[in-house]
Amino acid sequence: MNSDLAYLSAVELAAAIRTKALSPVEVVRFFLTRIEAENPRINAFVRVLPEHALARAAAAEAAVMRGENIGPLHGVPVAIKDLFDFKAGVPNTFGCRVFAEFVPEESATYVQRLEAAGAIVIGKTNTPEFGHKGTTDNLLFGPTSTPFAPGRNAGGSSGGSAAALAAGLVPLAQGSDAGGSIRIPAAWCGVYGYKASFGRVAAAYRPNAFLAHTPFVHAGPMARSVKDAALMLNVMGRSHPRDPLCLPDGGEDFLAAASSKVRGLRVAFSPDLDVFPVESGVGRVVEAALDGFRAAGASVERVKLGIKRPQSEWSALWNRQMAVLYAAMAEDFHEAGIDLVHDHRNQVPVEVIDLIETGRRMSALSSKLDDRLRTEFADALQDVLDDYDALVTPTLACQPVENTTDGRTLGPTRVGGEAVDPGIGWCLTYPINWSGNPAASIPAGLDDDGLPVGLQLVGRRHGDATVLALSQAFEVAHPWHEIYSRAATGSIRDC
């Protein structure tokens, strides 16, 4: 097998395995070899599982040879973010030193479904501690780089998954998104990241089934093509009896929906969500890319959302809501005998400690009153989507930052001369988590330095099919696959 296999789509790979044109064992061996050779320059994988993956591949190959009825991802390697449990006798570290040896007792809901569909988990990918910021770096494994510019960050918190895809180390990867953690690294790594509608991908959280009790925390697929993500969503996007917040199964075929025509659809364009500073180089790439929707037959019109509060108020709101979530998480750990704040303070980033302590100080009433601010943004978004089928914005305000050596890489503190929160304030992604709308980051093109720029596409509530169809139409009109030859060498920019 030659290196072309590294960038073969998951749809093509699954078909080739099904028809016996490719062997699952050969495929897994190829990617294991590629990870060994290429991972050191970007640090996408923090744990590779050769024995497990090869054993699964052998079983998958035997099933094909016996003519068994196989799943849609049979024999296809997949990466799992090291924030989610995978029951294979390997640690799930949450990117944190405290949990370096923590071995879960069962796999997360969507991991179970990927395996049931025949996917082969080949390893765990890097993430910041508990996914707390928009960059991928931690005190346990260090930073992950975008393959386009090793030395510059991949984005977070699903940065390892995005970087692995762009470097051709795996065809599919799983991510999660509480403020952009799928879309942010997708933008900086030039891949397609899809945050499904809230509740589309079930998550049977325990011990607290209501951990994400309002639209906020999402999970979804990451891939190099829209159809690959849609295929993965077909597997992940189903209800679960132990998730009280998931959407009911509606028999959707998201892979088929991705091929739907978009002629006549109306797309709204906001260059800045009214109040976000955006680097001019990013804005130019995104505006130029809008012709991809027009070429597919959709119309594009610039709009205002009517947002009045400054972006600093919105990022402060997101931090408060994350604080409540992290305080609850810390309490769960505390009841299990792990006190992050007092016993492990030096092993956890100060930003995480601050979130936990902020959450503990907040009253239930103040937390609920914050939902009124969420409502303001959700209403402004819906005002646009009452008249348009989707909204397009830049995914991020800036380009990849340089990694630091202290495990605490953050985003910029200023964009366009305006102060922004370095954890999340440069991301135009997190407000969309408040409403639960489906959203994707699409590769829009490369800037003057050869770095990828992401375009965020937001759909109506539960409108996953439309977002996927518009994404696929854009990919056909504005293909991006050739950029991965540059990502494979990281030769564009010397950092």
Image (tube, helix red, strand yellow):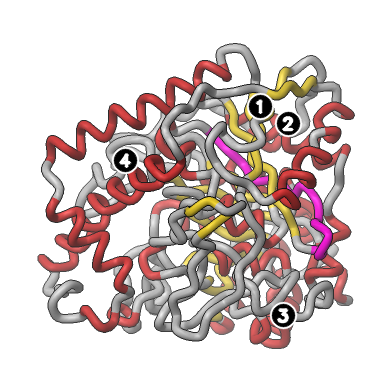
- Please name the residue that numbered disc 2 is placed on: 470
Residue 447 lies in the magenta stretch:
yes
- Please name the residue that numbered disc 4 is placed on: 243
Residue drawn at the location 38% of the way across and 25% of the way down: 376
Mark 2 vs mark 4, foreground winner is 2
- Residue placed most toward the observer, 304 or 342: 304
Mark 2 and mark 4 lie on one chain; the one further toward the N terminus is: 4
Considering the whole magenta stretch, tell me its main secondary structure: strand
- Residue placed most toward the observer, 406 or 212: 406
Q: Residue furthest top?
A: 387
Residue drawn at the location 35% of the way across and 76% of the way down: 96
Label annotation for residue 481: none
Type of amino acid under label 2: Leu
Q: Quadrant of the C terminus?
A: bottom right
Task: Please tell me how crowded label 1 is: few (under 14), some (14-19), or many (20+) other residues with Cα within 10 Å.
Answer: many
- Asked if the residues shown at circle 1 and circle 2 are in contact, with their CB atoms under 8 angstroms apart, the answer is yes
Task: Please tell me how crowded label 3 is: few (under 14), some (14-19), or many (20+) other residues with Cα within 10 Å.
Answer: few
Tell me how far mark 3 sits from mark 2, CA to CA: 35 Å
Task: Please tell me how crowded label 2 is: few (under 14), some (14-19), or many (20+) other residues with Cα within 10 Å.
Answer: many
Disc 1 element: helix
Mark 3 and mark 2 lie on one chain; the one further toward the N terminus is: 2
Tell me how far mark 3 sits from mark 4, CA to CA: 45 Å
Mark 1 and mark 3 lie on one chain; the one further toward the N terminus is: 1
Tell me how far mark 2 sits from mark 4, CA to CA: 29 Å
- Please name the residue that numbered disc 3 is placed on: 495
- Please name the residue that numbered disc 1 is placed on: 466
Q: Horizontally, is 174 left or right of 493 in the view?
A: left
Residue 446: where, in percent of width, then height? Answer: 81, 56
